[in-house]
Image (cartoon, grey):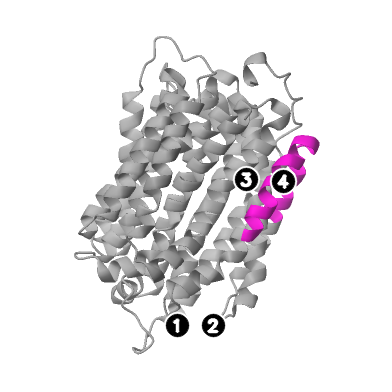
Amino acid sequence: MEYKWRVLSNTTIATLMAAIDTNIVLISLPTIGRELPGTSPTLVLWILLGYSLLTAVVLLNFGRLSDMFGRVRLYVLGFAIFTAGSALCGFSQTGLELVLFRLVQAVGAGFLFSNSAAIITDAFPPNERGRALGVNQVSIVVGAVSGLVLGGIITSTIGWRWIFFVNVPIGVIATLRARIDLHEIAKPEEKPRIDWAGNVLFALGLTLLLLAITLGALGQLAGPTAIAVGGFGGAMLVAFLWVESREASPMLDLSLFRNRQFTASAVALLLNALARGAFTFILVFYLQGPPRFLSPFTAGLFLIPVSASLATVGPVSGWLSDRYGPRPFLVAGLLISGSGFLWLSQIGPDDSFWQLALPLLLVGAGMGLFAAPNRAAMMTAVPPTRRGVASGIGTTFLNTGSTVSLGFTLVVMASALSRSEIQQIFLGTANSSVPFAGGAGFLAAIHLIFLISSILVFSALIPTVLRGREPPAPVPSPESVD
């Protein structure tokens, strides 16, 4: 097989596995909350948030490290860590253990996410990158959604622990194949240097901000204390930007944002991530919580339209953007997915599969149209030596936006529901035999969240339209092809 196709097949398996594990746990959370000893509502949230948070925190630095020490080397290491973390998660005996082992998974996922796009960009010539990145990047979104379907099936049949165990044989084989098949193309930097100050400020700032949001919303931090912790976290993120603007070897290379194409793609990506980060989280609890109380398997089936439209539209969009440029596909994708979110802001308490199918198709098709052209434009806008950092920035924006979106969703729910009602929903203890007083408030919160999501998606049209004329594609260099 030609080298570039070996690269694409291996990196797509990697990103698909890591993306599936972003959400495969989500549909199983009510079951995990009931069955795993010592699991509180806070731990239920952090089984999900801890993975997303740590992935977001390490991505920038891992992208930087890949430019310094070799992308393939760290990519293979990530596959091995992710596989080991999956096995540990399956053997967890308490909620706290599962949170900690999910962090091990997140480290591996960080290596995979931060390097896959850069390895693909190195291996493919410019006129084929959109199609290749389309397959790879759509696998992230498809994996995130299909993980819900797969998780529902596994949890309803052989138990929630197997959502982790299924990764192990696939991960072992793929790690060995990556070690054998892939080789370095880009030359590592000489005299590498790690930005320790930037790493600490970014990690602590984002962690404190999310802790303030989640613990404050659940009443485990008093209002003034939560505001103070969140404010301190925000101040650390501001300090992070100040440090990065003066650091000789920054983990976040702010000079890349002088490129108009790169900046427009990054801002649109962040707004899109903020909009859809809580999308599946809300739908899972809408379908499995009051008043529907569907099984994980049935809830997963309801989400098939999103996966199907993503898998169909995404690769085609990447291929077409190589031929006609990314702008029309970016605009169309944002308009379509924004309309889908706006439609979802009017869903009822017992909508049928077919009533939900059309808005979910719109959201999925819009995401598929947007993802590949936007990432291809972002990666092509930077020089080859900076693609590891650029890939890390793109995936960091994606994961940070999604993680912050989850935190914001919790705040909205906390404003509409009591703590006991939130606990019933998150621990899966609400059931059809017990009246649930907060049904109207829960549905109103869902409507508000999806309305805000539609506004964020439509806002992403601004940087997309103002991105300027696309530069001509560079001539492929000899080292970019096999």
Which residue is labeled 3 in the image?
371
Q: In the figure, residue 68 lies in which quadrant?
A: top left
Q: Is disc 2 in contact with disc 4, using a CB cutoff of under 8 Å?
A: no
Considering depth in this image, is 36 or 270 the residue closer to the camera? 36
Q: Is residue 454 left or right of residue 322?
A: left
N-terminal label among 4 and 3: 4
Tag shown at residue 317: 4
Q: Is residue 169 above or below residue 378?
A: below
**How crowded is the residue under tag 1: few (<14 C-alpha within 10 Å), some, or many (20+)?**
many
**Label 4 residue SS:** helix
- Give the magenta range: 308-335
Which residue is labeled 1 in the image?
291
| Residue 166 horizontal/vertical position (percent) | 39, 53
**How crowded is the residue under tag 4: few (<14 C-alpha within 10 Å), some, or many (20+)?**
many
N-terminal label among 2 and 1: 1
Tell me the CA gap for discs 2 and 4. 34 Å
Q: Is disc 4 in contact with disc 3, using a CB cutoff of under 8 Å?
A: yes
| Residue 111 horizontal/vertical position (percent) | 41, 34
Q: Quadrant of the C terminus?
A: top right
Secondary structure of the magenta portion, mostly? helix
From the viewer's perspective, is the residue at label 2 or at label 4 nearer?
4
| Residue 480 horizontal/vertical position (percent) | 63, 20
Q: Quadrant of the N terminus?
A: top right
Tag shown at residue 350: 2
